Image (cartoon, coloured by chain):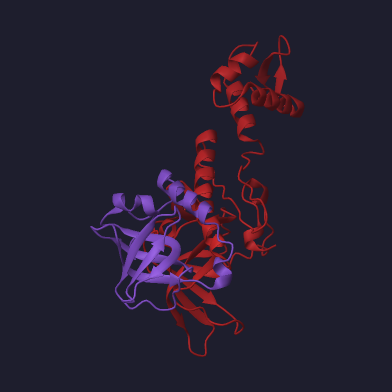
Amino acid sequence: MALWEQGGGSGFQQRKAGGSGDNDTGSGQRSTVKGVLTCTVATILNAKHSESDNCFVYKHLKFNTVMVMGLIREANHEANGSLATYQIDDHSGGLLEIKWWHDDSGEPMKPLTYIKVVGQVKTFNNKVHVVAHHINKMQSLNELLAHSIECVHASMSIRKQGELTGTGMTSNTSHTSGQTQQSSAIANGFTPVQNAVLNVLKTVTSMTGYSVTEICKQLKQFSENQVKQALEFLSGEGHIYSTTDDDHFRAASN
Amino acid sequence: MTHHYRINGSMIQQFSGKPVSIIGTVSKIHPSGNVLDLETSDQQHIVVRSSDHIVDVNPGNIIEVLGEVDNRNQIACDTIVTFEPEQTANFDMDMYNQAVMLFQHYPQDYLVNL
């Protein structure tokens, strides 16, 4: 499966050794942040590498693999070599260096053309660059437009997830053209509503637990319907149980 | 390369003196060869003055202009990006116009170097 086709989120955390295709040559350490983040050049240039998370971090965004689109300002092709280096500009500020190890097929890309790059962020001498897995010439200006909008969407999606679950969750929206991207990640196997309801019930001190109305009062961001559906799911799975009547619940792990 | 704000015609005044990027349709090229008239994504017309002689651009072409807004609400442009016909065929200029406003409304998500 190509790197950018992996879904984001916890479903893909378990990988078989050697099957990662991550280009982590020799490090032996597998990155925990999977998926491809669609983002601006400024995001990458401002990111810092986090040893503990083994990924790059900027504000609420955590990533190793990125998708960017920008205008080639400088192109350097190694004579008799397979390395091409591009400096790309997406007007967000700064130039991003792209290293592209290519075979001899395809014509070299020229300055003042837009390209789309999917690749891994690396640092060298305190400067970031991207090692490209794929480079394509922009097919249509609509592609650039969609990409820019996706940058906003990805960031907003991740920011909202972080606010809802209150955890430092690293989930990236994956992007494949023609496919709807997965924009709501799952934490601990639960959706944000289910997680929130479960967390409320875990704070119960009485034997009666909380009624549906009380839970809704504590979770104003969700509708009563959403809370009821979450309760149905959680009790079906055995994480919560009803007490005095069908309207009152407690968490099973209390 | 500093951050260039993506703008449309109605935003020109508020970005006076700032670096901008505008995508629009060429409506006219002045005989001097250094100045062109651009129709923006919100159907306004702006004047673009280029430092170099403008080449490879014809009326009806969609181009991207990178430059600064001067005190006459014209663009002093240093780079004109042209596209192949296949790249601009079916370009959704209305969607682009909406996107331009989207980037303004969500500075915490459209991340740039200010």
Image coordinates for residue A33, horizontal then vertical, percent: 56, 53
Q: Is A234 situated above or below A42?
A: above
Q: As drawn, which residue projects farthest toward the front? A: B31
Quadrant of the image occupied by residue A213: top right
Q: Between residues A38 and A18, which one lies in front from this camera angle?
A: A38
Q: Which residue lies furthest to the right in this view?
A: A236
Give how far across and how far down residue A153 sits, in percent: 53, 47
Q: Quick check: A128 above or below A73?
A: above
Q: Is residue B30 left or right of residue A174?
A: left
Could you tell me how many numbered marks the image carries?
A: 0
User: Can residue A211 be seen?
Assistant: no
Name the spot of residue A218 as percent of width and height, x first: 54, 20
For the point 66% across and 36% down, the residue is A190
> Which chain has been coloured purple in this picture?
B
Q: In which quarter of the image is the N terminus of chain A?
A: bottom right
**Does residue B48 show up?**
yes
Horizontal side, residue A85 vs residue A248: left or right: left
- Quadrant in which the C terminus of chain A is drawn: top right
Chain assigned red: A
The image quarter in which residue B68 lies:
bottom left
Q: As displayed, is residue B88 above or below residue B12?
A: below
Q: Where is residue A247 in the image (x, y as percent from the top left)?
A: 69, 13
Relative to the observer, which residue lies in front, A248 or A77? A77
Viewer-closest of A137 and A16: A137
Farthest residue in the top direction?
Answer: A244
Looking at the image, the residue that sits furthest to the bottom is: A80
* Point 55% across, 27% down: residue: A221
In the image, B7 versus A16, the foreground residue is B7
